[in-house]
Amino acid sequence: MTPKKKKSRTQKIRIAPFVAIFIFLVCGAIGISLGEPSRVLEQARQVCLSCIGIG
Amino acid sequence: MDLVRKWVQALFFLVTNGYWNFPLTRGIYQGPLKVICSPGLNCYSCPAATSYCPLGALQQLLGGIRLAIENGQFYVGFYVIGAMGAIGSFVGRMVCGWACPFGLFQELLHKIPSPKFGIWRPLRYMKYLILLFMVILLPLFAVDAFGLGSPWFCKYLCPAGTLEAGFPMLILQPSLRANLGLLFYNKVFFLVFFLAWAVLASRPFCRTACPLGAFYALFSKIKLVKLRLDPEKCTHCKACHSVCPMGVHFNESPEDMECISCLACSKACNFNAITLEIGGVAVTNQRPCRPEKAFPQHQ
Ligand code: SF4
Ligand code: SF4
């Protein structure tokens, strides 16, 4: 293997992570369009009795 | 590098627990930042927490899915899964090594002088069962007469909730103590069990029981930021084995789902066989080889 070829093999850009990040950002955007953040906020503002261990 | 990591861990601890007014309000933070996902395991009922816990939010959404749909609200978890998945695709379990307050706490406990032990490898699979059953299936399908599911992981197991929310809230709001019972003592048992185990073994909760780590581990092959092994440089000296806090043999399993990208192995490798890459491009500097240097021992 020539040094040039070796370099191009080791520095090859991986596409999969970008695709995965994009898919999950779209997933999050769907959640936002459905109004989920307000529900999450509502839950996070209340003390969760299950977390404390009493409910 | 370990010092840099400790500072980053401390920074994430302070940012995700940055509400220091709680001794005055005697309650939890209720501001708008709580719409942001905490990358690591950080209970959102901790009085100082400034962001939401993805596991808690997901279980609550799944448990309430029937009622929400009956009311015409399609709250099925897209927002939370989107945030968790984006973090996972970006850095995967690097969150465990760099941004999780409970991971930091276990690391500090492990510094207490004591005999140190390894962890039986098959126990690692338990966390995937906990993710599947306690975080997804049971909240979704084990419902009460009103069609509401419970957050099983938070309710019966989560030691971070007991430590960060349970004890502080019982101190801040003494009226809550009237409800103490078996549920609480069960959670205290798990907390004490994992904390004692963390003194004796490295990161036992992360390795055997954390469903958030299990979720991020699913991205070990495709995550953007990861470590890479150069098989041509590796001499199989096994120096990377002894420093790994997660029991990974990096040169034998460079995409191991347990790896938290702490970079300890990269530092220990005297042949520059382990580099950090982002999206396929190496970013760590190549050091001169030091084959004669003695290796530090972990666990
Ligand atoms: S320390 Fe480096 S050279 Fe030694 S086994 Fe690990 S990766 Fe290979
Ligand atoms: S394999 Fe290396 S980077 Fe991964 S957890 Fe072990 S020492 Fe850290």
Image (cartoon, rainbow, N blue to C red):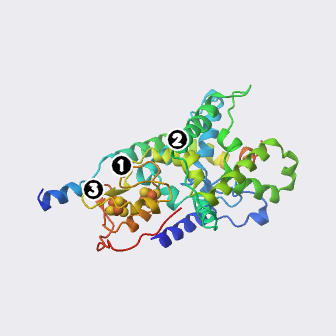
- Residue B238 in the image, given as x and y percentages of width and height: 38, 60
Within 10 angstroms of label 1, few (less than 14), some, or many (20 or more) residues?
A: many
Q: Is residue B105 left or right of residue B39?
A: right
Q: At label 1, which amino acid type do we have?
A: Pro
**Furthest-left residue in this view:** A2
Lower position in the chain sequence, tag 2 or tag 3 = 2
- In the rendered image of this protein, does residue B35 appear above or below residue B16? above
Q: Where does the image place residue B61, in percent across and percent down from the top left?
A: 61, 38
Q: Is residue B261 visible?
A: no
The correct choice, above or below, for B60 with respect to A5 in the image is above
At x 43% / y 58%, what residue is drawn?
Answer: B241
Q: Say whether mark 3 and mark 2 are on the same chain.
A: yes
Q: Secondary structure at mark 1?
A: helix
Q: Residues within 10 Å of mark 3 (few under 14, many from 20)?
A: few
Kindly identify which residue carries mark 3: B231
> Label 3 amino acid?
Pro
**Separation of residues labelled 2 and 3 (CA atoms):** 28 Å
Q: Is residue A15 above or below residue B244?
A: above
The spot of residue A53 in percent (x, y) is 76, 46
Front one among A31 and B190:
B190
Subunit of mark 1?
A: A
State the residue at coordinates (33%, 46%).
A16
Residue type pointed to by label 2 = Tyr
CB at disc 3 and ligand 1 closer than 8 Å: no
Mark seen at residue B125: 2
Residue in front for this viewpoint, B243 or B129: B243
Q: Is residue B273 left or right of residue A25?
A: left
The CA span between labels 3 and 1 is 23 Å
